[in-house]
Amino acid sequence: MSVELGGHIVVTGTNRGIGLELVRQLAEKTGVEAHIYACCREPEGTTAQALRELTLKHPGKITLIKLDLADEDSISAAVQTVGQRIGPDGLNLLINNAAVNKPDGMASLQNVRKSDMMDVFEVNVTGPFLLTKMFLPLLQRAVSRSKDKGDEMSCRRSAVINVSSLAGSIEKCPENFHFAHIYPYRTSKAALNMLTRCQAEDLSSQNILVMCIHPGWVRTDMGGEEAPLSSEDSVVGMLRVMSSLSRKHTGTLLDWEGNTIAW
């Protein structure tokens, strides 16, 4: 099954889990004109072996980019590298997927330190903020060169997708807090949701779509073995949702099945 996505696509946090699966399915399901820029902290390290194998399986379609979202200089260098490779076309889709949770396991009130809160916020909120800000000229360029006319919005034209979480919903917190305290992760995703709403308002006049998507509770290193959803099924749903997005979806939080989640 193909997806209605294409052009130049940047994905962060691609060495494992949902990010790796996003790269795999995008490489398999998009047309020959699509190119994926797969970002991770150590593209030459042992943790990126599966990612490097994907680049060999899809020669010419995936470019590995070194990116550490906790390092502003690394973000700037990654944006510059991608910009040089993209050329005049612009960036069609930025998927801010990378995220961390500290400390490992149940990050309850008693065992969370100030440094945990700050480290998680830096990667999960400040990182996507800076990356979107620095990529904005390339996102704007994609709008100007798009065949779509008027005020149309889509992930084929120019869009920012922030991978958020149900755990960041303030309204839903009483329903699920008991089995996942994770203070730093929850508060960072709530902040990412507000960042998304702000950017959506800011960029709507430029026809750049910005929204959040919840991938579900997925069996990854972060999600754990008890999670009911596989990375493959989650990403199938996420890409289906991304393919269907339009102006009415900018500034929203949807799950991998397209259902609206309360802020």
Image: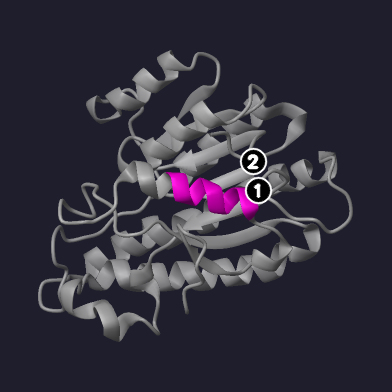
Tell me, yes or no, if residue 119 can be seen here: yes
Residue 58, position as x, y percentages in the image: 48, 17
In front of the other: label 2 or label 1? 2
The structure residue drawn at horizontal position 51% and vertical position 28%, both measured from the top left corner, is: 27
Q: Which residues are magenta?
A: 236-244
Q: Which residue is mark 1?
A: 155
When the figure is inspected, residue 53 is found, relative to residue 12, above or below; the finding is above
Q: Main secondary structure of the magenta part?
A: helix
Which quadrant of the figure has residue 79? top right
Q: Which residue is mark 2?
A: 4
Residue 243, position as x, y percentages in the image: 61, 48
Front-most of residues 225 and 210: 225
Q: Is residue 196 magenta?
A: no
Which quadrant of the figure has residue 216? bottom left
Left or right: 41 in relation to 161: left
Residue 84, position as x, y percentages in the image: 65, 27
Amino acid, disc 2: Glu
The structure residue drawn at horizontal position 23% and vertical position 64%, both measured from the top left corner, is: 116
Which quadrant of the figure has residue 2? top right
Whether residues under marks 2 and 1 lie with C-beta atoms below 8 angstroms apart, the answer is yes
Q: Is residue 237 magenta?
A: yes
The structure residue drawn at horizontal position 64% and vertical position 56%, both measured from the top left corner, is: 245
Left or right: 59 in relation to 224: right
User: Which residue ends up furthest to the left in the rendered image?
Assistant: 110
Q: Earlier in the sequence, mark 2 or mark 1?
A: 2
**Gap between marks 2 and 1 measured at Cα:** 8 Å
When the figure is inspected, residue 94 is found, relative to residue 56, above or below; the finding is below
